[in-house]
Amino acid sequence: MATQKLEIPPVPPLGTSGVFYSQDLQNQNNNILRLFFIRLVGVLSSLFGPAGARFVDAPNGLFFSTADQTLAATNTGYAVTFNNTYLNNYLSVVDSSKVTAVYGGIYQFQFSGQIKSTNASPKDVFLWMKRDGTTIGYTTHQYTVEGSDNHVNINWNFSIDLSSGQYLQFFWAATDTAVTLETTVATTPHPGIPSAVVSVTYVAPLPDTLPTPP
């Protein structure tokens, strides 16, 4: 199915007669304006009518990792990285971990990661956020995983404000280094499993007064 786009009517090319009044020119300009407004009303009707959101070119992105991610030390934060891009409309990943917005706005993030435990002992895994390198208070999620070769899927959906050029990072840490954000290659009957994936969608413009992080 072909992609549908709204055709923005061009600025009407109105004629001018200088200092002399011309009824013919006025009639011509009136016809040009009439056609312009007919086209403009058509565009607005499509945009604000049923299913009009399909014409909105909103920022969005989807990024994922096909690499195992490990921890070199316990109780130490490491950035979650993404090495593949599926969608990147005005959003991109910089330096492997910084989900960066071209335009300011409120963004919806949907994060998922696959944690693998590599020994039998129980261990706590923590996931939190940083914006422009600054930790955002009360953003930590805690998970517990145990058992050799056991897996836990971590999910997190949230909205957050990003100004133009700002970036968001996910950090993780654990009480034991015997834990991995693991990727799994395709094996019959299923496709591959990413170690981490994040989907980002533009929700709304920034408020006049930005919220203060806790």
Image (cartoon, rainbow, N blue to C red):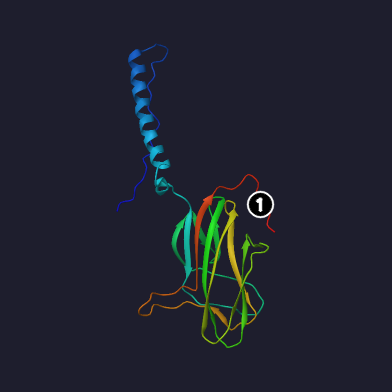
Residue located at (47% from left, 62% from top): 62
Report which residue position mark 1 lands on: 211
Identify the residue shown where x is 38% and y is 16%: 17
- Residue 211 in the image: state x and y as whole percent: 66, 52
Q: Is residue 151 left or right of residue 185?
A: right
Q: Quadrant of the C terminus?
A: bottom right
- Of all residues shown, which one is farthest toward the left? 1
Q: Position of residue 21 (x, y in %)?
A: 39, 11
Q: Position of residue 29 (x, y in %)?
A: 36, 21
Viewer-nearest residue: 62 or 150:
150
Residue type (three-letter) at the residue carrying disc 1: Pro
Q: Is residue 186 above or below residue 104?
A: below
Above or below, 37 relative to 62: above
Quarter where residue 154 is shown: bottom right
Q: 132 and 161: which one is in front?
A: 161
The residue sitting at 62% across, 64% down in the picture is 129
Q: Position of residue 3 (x, y in %)?
A: 33, 50
Mark 1 closeness class: few <14, some 14–19, many ≥20 residues within 10 Å:
few
The image quadrant of residue 35 is top left
